[in-house]
Amino acid sequence: QTYAPKLILLDITDISCIRDVAKEILNCYGCVDILINNASMKVKGAVQSISLELDKKIMDANYFGPITLTKAILPNMISRRTGQIVLINSIQGKIGIPFRAA
């Protein structure tokens, strides 16, 4: 079965709305076959000049947002015994790059 695309806006750093968006998607389509987490945020600057607020926003976009979305979709995948989750991010998680501490 083919479904018409539906545009759903999501600010992945707004953790409080992610579960509602996931619920909207599941209510509309019934399931998610493939979840591709492809959001990330980076900032360049000296670690002492980056605010803790910006560090938190980066962590929300790069970690807490995708994990919250995954946890909201995963129970449906488990109950159907099918589905795939893909995380696309940056090599910067494995190597240190100057002025990219966050």
Image: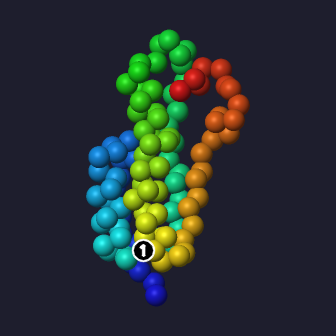
Q: Is residue 44 above or below residue 68?
A: above
Question: Image point 46% across, 33% down: which residue?
Answer: 58
* Residue 24 percent across, percent down from the top left: 30, 66
Q: Give the residue pinned by disc 1.
A: 31
User: Toward the viewer: 69 or 51?
Assistant: 69
* Residue 39 percent across, percent down from the top left: 50, 47
Q: Is residue 53 above or below residue 91?
A: above
> Can you name the residue that lies furthest to the top here?
48
Picture quadrant where residue 23 is located: bottom left
Q: Secondary structure at mark 1?
A: loop
Q: Is residue 30 above or below residue 97?
A: below
> Can you name the residue that lies furthest to the bottom here?
1
Please give the count of numbered marks on the rendered protein.
1
The kind of residue tagged 1 is Cys
> Can you name the residue that lies furthest to the right here?
95
Question: Image point 28% across, 58% down: which residue?
Answer: 20
Crowd band around label 1 with a 10 angstrom C-alpha radius: few (<14), some (14–19), many (20+): some
Is 21 displayed left or right of 86 in the figure? Answer: left
* Residue 35 percent across, percent down from the top left: 51, 63
**Colour scheme of the rendered structure:** rainbow
Question: Image point 47% across, 35% down: which residue?
Answer: 59
Question: Image point 43% across, 46% down: which residue?
Answer: 65
Is 78 displayed left or right of 29 in the figure? Answer: right
* Residue 16 percent across, percent down from the top left: 29, 46
